[in-house]
Amino acid sequence: MPDVPGPDAPRLAGVDEAGRGPLAGPVVAAAVILDVQKPIHGLADSKQLSARRREQLAAEIAERALCVGLAVIEAGEIDHINILQATLKAMCLAVAELSPQPTMVHIDGNQAPPLNLPLKTLIGGDRIDPAIGAASIVAKVHRDRLMQDWHKHFPEYGFDRHKGYPTPAHLAALKRFGPCPAHRQSFRPVAQLSLF
């Protein structure tokens, strides 16, 4: 019979975000504690995976991880507190959603959110740390779904294709139609065209 980790076994949470760079939509953070008894194969930086593979892995993470936390900070709050603070806040909220709480947190990147937990930042962590890779997948899949919802309300911007990133098609739509409620008013290309 395999050894089962006891309640005092270390619990490592990986944390990552999706949506720092777009001109529209929320920033989403995810925190994941993987279950060592239920390994998940193929975890990687979400950007290196196809949308279909991300969806498959997100379902597997939801089923096999010890716990998953998610947090969403909408465009209006991003405008109010800035994208860095919104990202750090989302990370803190995602970790707070975990039950049980982690004993150690690994954060993708070099910016540490104000957590009262031992933590380590890892540049490129989504490629080298499976828990961070899992978090990057969960955050990306959840944010993409939210952008699909925005697309239903404002199809003229093409959010289903570019997810709010500043592609030529998005910038052209922004110039033609002006910003919608999904847009981040404080981001320069939007601020220059803002009609609000």
Image (cartoon, helix red, strand yellow):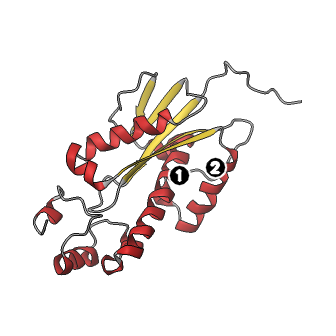
Q: Give the SS element for disc 2.
A: helix
Regarding residue 148, the answer to whether it shows in the image is yes
Foreground pick, 49 / 75: 75
In percent of the image, x 55 and y 47: which residue is there?
134
Dividing the image into 4 quarters, which one contains the N terminus? Answer: top right
Dividing the image into 4 quarters, which one contains the C terminus? Answer: bottom left
Up the image or down, 99 lies above or below 147; here it is above
Q: Is residue 64 left or right of residue 30?
A: right
* Residue under pointer 1: 138
Foreground pick, 37 / 82: 82
Q: Position of residue 170 (x, y in %)?
A: 27, 74
Quadrant hosting residue 57: bottom right
Query: Which of pointers 2 and 1 lies earlier in the amino acid sequence?
Result: 2
Q: Is residue 70 left or right of residue 21?
A: right
Regarding residue 161, the answer to whether it shows in the image is no
* Residue under pointer 2: 62
Q: Give the SS element for disc 1.
A: helix
Q: Which mark is residue 22?
A: none
Q: Position of residue 32 (x, y in %)?
A: 56, 40
Q: Is residue 175 left or right of residue 148?
A: left
In percent of the image, x 29 and y 62: which residue is there?
24
Q: Position of residue 81 (x, y in %)?
A: 22, 43
Residue density around tag 1, few if under 14, some if 14–19, many if 20 or more, within 10 Å: many
In percent of the image, x 37 and y 74: which residue is there?
153
In percent of the image, x 16 and y 77: which residue is there?
175
Mark 2–mark 1 contact, CB under 8 Å?
A: yes
Residue type at the position of mark 2:
Ala
Marks 2 and 1, how far apart in space? 9 Å
Q: Residue furthest top?
A: 8
Residue type at the position of mark 1:
Val
Foreground pick, 180 / 57: 180
Residue density around tag 2, few if under 14, some if 14–19, many if 20 or more, within 10 Å: some
